[in-house]
Amino acid sequence: MKNLLFSLLFILAGNMAAGQSWYNLRNGADGLNALGVIFTTCTDDTGNVYAAGNFPENPDSANSKICVARWSAIRLRWERLGEGAAGINVERTIETMCVDKAGNVYAAGGFRDGPFSFSGYFYVARWDGHSWAKLGTGDSALKANRHISSLATDDSGNIYAAGYFLNIYGFCYVAKWSVVTLTWSELGHLSANEIIQSIVVDDSFNVYATGTFTDWQHHPYVAKYSPVTDTWISLGSGFAVPHKFIYKTLLALDTFNHLYVAIDGTDSASFDDSSWIYKWVGTNMVSLGGHAGFKGNTFSVKNDD
């Protein structure tokens, strides 16, 4: 499933008649009851919804660890993915998640694998239906030296990760976990000079990445990776948006592999914080909403693979 999911405090229930209403996805004992911020959501092919952020497994315990919650489409309730010793067992924020075709759940963010806080490498955790484990160990480990801000998967089950972490040359890059070699490797040579905030993968295994990184003209842009040529290219010549500063850019693909870009920045005319949404059409980024375009005062976008 691929769509744009705009959410701040609630989730759209997909089985509402004609999709005309919003409502809280269960209250009370079966509710999410997240005592904290929800930073990331995703769904799987069976209709389950996953949420994570910095909310604890047990809101009544001061020593409770961060958790991943799942809305069960069968039980119609929220439940924690692995509780207690079987939990994800992280103390820092979960910033991104994805689910592969087999139903494995992947989570990453600001947590590390060291024995103490702020020690070790940042990593991707995988839930296989029974327990959480680090994706790749030893020489096959990702060993990210900074936060992971985005995860994606393709139809073969390969996993892609990007964010703040750097390669040996000091550039941000997209890492790929191969289900064939069972190891992490750098995907092409994007050489991003700033943060990669969002990645998505289309049905042809092309990978798209965006963030605050810029081209040689200092224009933020969407980069596209082709598995055929093993190269990254820029889609167009950067964003022609009415902004002076860009804080965040995020991507989403719809069912037809149309690419959308959401941009959070500062309007160069009013100096107000604003948001814009664009669609890649042919060879151009087209503003949604015609000449006036879409302009919001804040946004939250999640691509759902």
Image (spheres, rainbow, N blue to C red):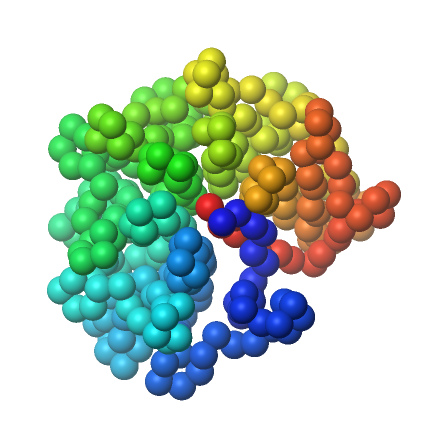
Q: In this view, does 3 lie above or below 188?
A: below
Give the image location of residue 102, x and y in percent: 31, 47
Most extreme residue toward the bottom, as rendered? Answer: 28
Give whichever of 186, 16 is nearer the camera: 16
Q: Residue furthest top?
A: 229
Q: Which residue lies furthest to the right in this view?
A: 291
Q: Looking at the picture, tell me which residue is in the foreground, 88 or 3.
A: 3
Q: Where is residue 117 in the image (x, y as percent from the top left)?
A: 22, 53
Number of numbered tags placed on the structure image: 0
- Tell me if 79 is positioned left or right of 220 in this view: left
Q: Residue, x 35% and y 45% (percent of image)? A: 100
The residue positioned 70% from the left and 58% from the top of the image is 297
Q: In which quarter of the image is residue 171?
A: top left
Q: Where is residue 21 in the image (x, y as percent from the top left)?
A: 64, 73
Residue 156 sits in which quadrant? top left
Q: Which residue is found at the position 49% from the left and 28% from the top?
A: 204
- Relative vertical location of residue 294 with respect to residue 206 in this rendering, above or below: below
> Can the viewer see residue 10?
yes
Taking 268 as reference, is 22 above or below it? below
Q: Is residue 38 left or right of residue 12?
A: left
Residue 249 visible, this angle: no
Q: Residue at x 16, y 62 (%)?
A: 86
Task: Work out whether residue 249 or residue 227 is closer to the camera in this orientation and state it.
Answer: 227
Pinpoint residue 103: horizontal percent, then vertical percent. 32, 51
